[in-house]
Image: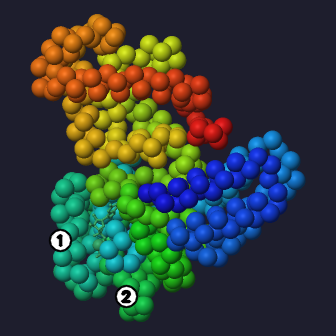
């Protein structure tokens, strides 16, 4: 996600940093490049203009020009302004007292409303709520069935009727929820085109008669500026409470994420990051800004890691890393842990300075399986002191792991490089920051 934008920013900042001292002219030139990068990322033009104006004002201030590392200062200004653009995000859902909370999902066709209804229901149930999914899409014949299937899969009740009146269905769903003591109702409405007046009117009717407590607009992040324009339209027609951006796992260019808050004035509640039901995350502007600017996403990484590694284990590992005692056995253990955290490619992207350098596809994942087998075929002593692995040991290891001595050699070489990289990360203070479990590590050359 946002790859092109990240790459462009990285080039722009590199040029700015290489200037040493900055002049007003340098800054303005840099800002012209920022503008082009944002345009290419499909950010809405008024949003870009406002953004550039603010950043330029701050950057041209005496402090930046006089400071020792002006390039770095500008990165900070852009970073802060980007966060401001997407803030505040608000993952909280206010629940009604004494009656079921009604949440209505609206959005264009195919943006991910039904999927998001399922994801949200699952998330809420894990927090102790009792959700009811309501099939309020009677336009597409298969839509009701789609929601029913989803409900069965998640073991979440679905309310559906054969009637043609959406408002009535929703009202009866509320009664049903009360009777069944279900406390959160999620209305899956039909996708519509913004130009379709009749369909828009239907939504307005539901909003007026059923009075949902929260109305969320589901926006497909891949569509960029068009998505944002339609968001504006929806926002004029309905009183939105928030936006859910979907398909952030795809090659979204960044336009929707950067513009939708400024254009609608409504907070981004959640982001969909995959088709699976557990792929709904809270939206954190500071992390997204960090990711766009190539600063990695240490906080997300740390949070993911924290789920898998206890504080104790993490400290032990950090000490080992710091002392340079990290050996192949530890490597194996970490690899197995990382695998539990999710696709490795995603994890690498979050490590500052590493994301753009390491690519992790299926082939690389297969390579990892091989590595695992090789290390598993080593003795404890070999894992600790790989330098004792001579040719006959290599042959034995290769046989044991169904690989070749060339594979074993390859791994040993890689491990050596990795140790070197760990030393570099250490000297950049990465582990110190991890230990603090907060704050963002700066990428190489930024800090
Ligand atoms: N990669 C990815 N795909 C998603 C995400 N959310 C939804 N999708 C996919 O988008 C497609 C459309 O999703 P639906 O939930 O059916 O969309 P909808 O808005 O209900 O569609 P209509 O009811 O026809 O308007 C499906 O293939 C989903 O799997 C997401 O966060 N990431
Ligand atoms: Mg749907």
From the viewer's perspective, is residue 179 above or below residue 303? below
Q: Which quarter of the rendering shows the N terminus?
A: bottom left
Quadrant for residue 98, please give it.
Answer: bottom left
The residue that appears at 43% across and 64% down in the rendered structure is 252
**Label 2 residue near ligand 1, CB within 8 Å:** no
Q: How far from the left and from the top, in percent, is residue 99?
A: 42, 62
Q: CA distance from mark 2 to mark 1?
A: 21 Å
Ligand 2 sits in which quadrant? bottom left
**Label 1 residue near ligand 2, CB within 8 Å:** no
Q: Is 53 left, or right, of 355 in this rendering?
A: right
Residue nearest the observer in this picture, 30 or 226: 30
The residue that appears at 81% across and 41% down in the rendered structure is 68
From the viewer's perspective, is residue 445 above or below residue 212? above
Mark 1 neighbour class, 10 Å CA radius: few under 14, some 14 to 19, many 20 or more? few
The residue that appears at 47% across and 78% down in the rendered structure is 226
Residue nearest the observer in this picture, 310 or 27: 27
- The label on residue 199 is 2
Looking at the image, tell me whether mark 2 or mark 1 is earlier in sequence order. Answer: 1
Q: Is 121 left, or right, of 69 in this rendering?
A: left
Dot 1 falls on a residue whose secondary structure is helix
Residue nearest the observer in this picture, 226 or 143: 226
Q: How far from the left and from the top, in percent, is residue 369?
A: 22, 33
Q: Do we see residue 181 in this rendering?
A: no
Number of numbered discs: 2
From the viewer's perspective, is residue 1 above or below residue 230? above
């Amino acid at each position: 996600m946002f790859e092109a934008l990240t790459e462009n920013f990285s080039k722009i900042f590199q040029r700015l940093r290489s200037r040493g001292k900055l002049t007003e002219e340098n800054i303005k030139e840099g800002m012209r490049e920022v503008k082009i990068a944002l345009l290419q990322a499909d950010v809405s033009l008024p949003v870009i203009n406002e953004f550039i104006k603010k950043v330029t004002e701050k950057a041209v201030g005496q402090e930046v020009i006089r400071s020792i590392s002006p390039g770095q200062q500008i990165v900070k200004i852009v970073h802060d302004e980007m966060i401001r653009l997407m803030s505040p995000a608000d993952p909280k859902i206010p629940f009604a007292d004494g009656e079921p909370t009604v949440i209505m999902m609206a959005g264009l066709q195919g943006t991910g409303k039904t999927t998001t209804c399922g994801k949200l229901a699952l998330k809420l149930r894990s927090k102790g709520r009792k959700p009811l999914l309501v099939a309020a899409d009677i336009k597409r014949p298969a839509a009701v069935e789609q929601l029913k299937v989803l409900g069965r899969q998640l073991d979440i009740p679905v309310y559906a009727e054969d009637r043609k009146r959406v408002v009535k269905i929703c009202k009866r769903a509320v009664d049903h929820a009360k009777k069944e003591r279900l406390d959160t109702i999620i209305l899956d409405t039909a996708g519509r085109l913004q130009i379709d007046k009749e369909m828009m009117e239907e939504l307005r009717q539901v909003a007026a008669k059923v009075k949902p407590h929260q109305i969320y607009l589901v926006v497909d992040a891949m569509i960029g500026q068009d998505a944002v324009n339609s968001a504006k339209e929806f926002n004029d027609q309905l009183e939105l409470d928030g936006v859910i951006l979907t398909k952030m796992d795809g090659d979204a260019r960044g336009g929707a994420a950067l513009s939708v808050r400024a254009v609608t004035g409504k907070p981004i509640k959640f982001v969909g990051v995959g088709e699976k039901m557990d792929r709904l995350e809270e939206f954190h502007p500071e992390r997204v800004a960090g990711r766009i600017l190539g600063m990695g996403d240490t906080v997300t990484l740390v949070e993911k890691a924290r789920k898998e590694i206890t504080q104790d284990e993490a400290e032990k590992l950090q000490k080992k890393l710091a002392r340079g005692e990290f050996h192949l056995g530890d490597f194996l253990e970490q690899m197995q842990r990382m695998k539990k955290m999710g696709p490795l490619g995603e994890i690498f992207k979050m490590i500052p300075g590493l994301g753009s350098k390491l690519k992790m596809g299926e082939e690389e994942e297969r390579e990892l399986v091989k590595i695992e087998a090789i290390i598993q075929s080593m003795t404890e002593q070999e894992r600790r002191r790989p330098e004792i692995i001579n040719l006959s040991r290599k042959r034995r290891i290769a046989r044991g792991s169904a690989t070749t001595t060339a594979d074993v050699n390859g791994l040993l070489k890689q491990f050596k490089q990795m140790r070197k990289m760990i030393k570099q990360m250490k000297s950049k203070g990465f582990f110190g920051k991890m230990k603090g479990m907060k704050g963002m590590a700066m990428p190489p050359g930024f800090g």
